[in-house]
Image (tube, coloured by chain):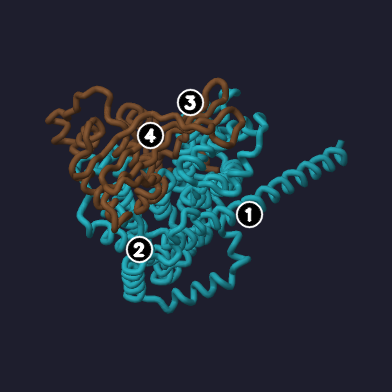
Chain colours: A cyan, B brown
Amino acid sequence: MTANLRGLDHFIFEEYRAPKAGLGIYRLLFSTYVLTYLPKHLWVSTFPNSFFDPPIGLTMFFAGFPGAYFFPLVNGLAILAAVCMLFGYRTRVASISFALLLFSCDAWGYSLGKIVHRDITLVFVPILMQFAGWGDTYSLDSRRRGGRFEEEERSADWPLALLALIVGMAMMTAALPKVTSGWLDPHAHAVRAHILSNVFVSGHANWFAEQMLRIRSGVFWKLCDYGTVSIEASFLLTVVRRRALRIVCAVACLFHLAITLTMQIAFVGNILAYAAVADWSVVESRVGGVLRMWNRILNKMSAPVIVGAGAALAFAYLRFGNPVQLPQQWDPLGTSICLLSALVAGGFLVGSVRDFASNRVKRGISFFRYS
Amino acid sequence: MISPTATVDPNAERKRAKIRLLFAVVILLQPVQYLVASRFGEPYPAFMMPGFSGTMTDRDGTVRLTNVKCKVDFRDGRVEWLSANDLLAQAPDSYRMSIMFHMFSLPPASGAEWQPPAFEARLFPGLAFARARQAQQELDPETKEWLKTRMETLYPSRKVEAVTFVWYEIIFSANQTSPEAADRPIGKREVRFQ
């Protein structure tokens, strides 16, 4: 095997190996978020078939929207699957079902001439993570099998590497159109123009955007353009090194917070995908009490209780609405998640810089000691 | 470290080969995705993120933004103005301008309406009809009916005579954060009710 192939094999099978406990914690976070996010696209039924404008894909073979019962049914099943995913009951089936249900719901929801890109991560994350074994800890599945999964501490290796690669390629699809459409032109200020469009066309006027638009320095706006393209391209360039990718993800969390505050677009789907490459097992020692309590809850849970709870939640959401989905233009939950992720990312970056600096100092000391 | 003489489990090696193939397929899908997106429009699903392409800026730094507002004429002679956000309040705000462009943009300059080829209409009816609708001079009856119902919801006690979608450009001179006093009209699409 050549060195290149060995390097490729290392990336696929070694680089993204993670403790299974961390993946279990990540599953809890992911499932909790999707339960705040569903139901969706229920409004589509208020539009007639003449508004049907499908993208290239599944729905282009149809002439109009599905019947009025489609969205409540698919959302109800997706909520049930998300509850099963949260408790880790038949996690593999629940994760794949959730992804397929969300995909079909989104495919029809995006048939009004608009694709919301940031949500595609919510479809492919559960599919890949169930291969990684995210249902093997803090789950009913592991309890039912007497904790047999937990003996094998490390996850299946390749799914996280594939997820990182997909995120890297997806982010590159955001960088390339910018490069080819003038974002690098020294005379154009693309970020400024997009904020103006967001304020004056989309109606997202807010204090942060106003403050930002007051800045007249061309250098500042050009740095914003270059910075945006650089961050988006960095994902694919660093994907083979987990540590480097984590730093890029952390910087991107700060970038997403800036977008949320100025443009009111919360890229929570992206943040959840970045969170997959973090090592959540380090949280175990800090929130051990909460996780022990979660395990005690799992001990009292049974399959009928989980399915019943999922069905009851689906009914409540569809009948009365999701209480955390506030009918406001400023998405408070998305903004809070972006803010929290930026704080965690900031802490991680400060820690990384400190580690780097202390290593340099240690190396310097050992150099002088032995030279 | 695996020694050169160590035996390799053929099942494990087969599994690893399949996984390598999966990675290769995902990488190869990327150019296919680009090709489909540039030739036919963006596919779904796709591993794509929003491009925010274009700078909307002239060489002299002037920013030009396209926007639309709806003029509502009532039978009693009064006039009200609606934004896309008001008209399409049921849809999430990220959808509204896309729907406005697709449904209520300016009628095509040439009078000829586009009819999809029979094969395309049969195999991809959604795509074919969406394209045909965009080429219509007049709004189709179903959309007109929806618009009428929407006006009745927004103005329950008043009779609407016509809705005009006024497309215009908002112009910002270089480094200005307020638009120029006058918007530059691009064109209009009028929908009259009986």
Give the residue type at disc 4.
Trp
Q: Residue A164's spot in the image, x, y percent?
A: 49, 43
Residue at the spot of label 2? A79
Q: Position of residue A349 (x, y in %)?
A: 66, 48
Marks 3/1: CA–CA distance? 33 Å
Which mark is first along the chain, 1 or 3?
Answer: 3
> Which of labels 2 and 3 is toward the front?
3
- Residue at figure coordinates x 47%, y 67% from the top left: A138
Q: Residues within 10 Å of mark 2 (few under 14, many from 20)?
A: many
Residue at image location 27% in from the left, 57% down from the top: A71
Q: Are marks 2 and 3 in contact (CB under 8 Å)?
A: no
Please name which of the two marks, 3 or 4, marks the residue nearer to the observer.
4
In the image: residue B92, left or right of residue B134: right
- Give the residue type that dot 2 points to: Ile
Q: Amino acid at mark 1?
A: Leu
Front residue of this view, candidates B18 and B53: B53
Please tell me if label 4 and label 2 are on a single chain: no
- Is A315 left, or right, of B194 in this rendering? right
Q: Which mark is residue B167?
A: 4
Q: If you read the primary sequence from the N terminus, does the residue marked by circle 2 or circle 3 appear first? A: 2
Q: Chain of mark 2?
A: A
Q: Chain of mark 4?
A: B
Residue B62 figure quarter: top right
Of tags 3 and 1, the one toward the viewer is: 3
Up/down of A60 relative to A29, above or below: above
Closer to viewer: mark 4 or mark 1: 4
> Share a chain, discs 3 and 4?
no
- Circles 3 and 1 on the same subunit: yes
Task: Say which mark, if any, is on residue A181.
Answer: 3
Residue carrying label 1: A343
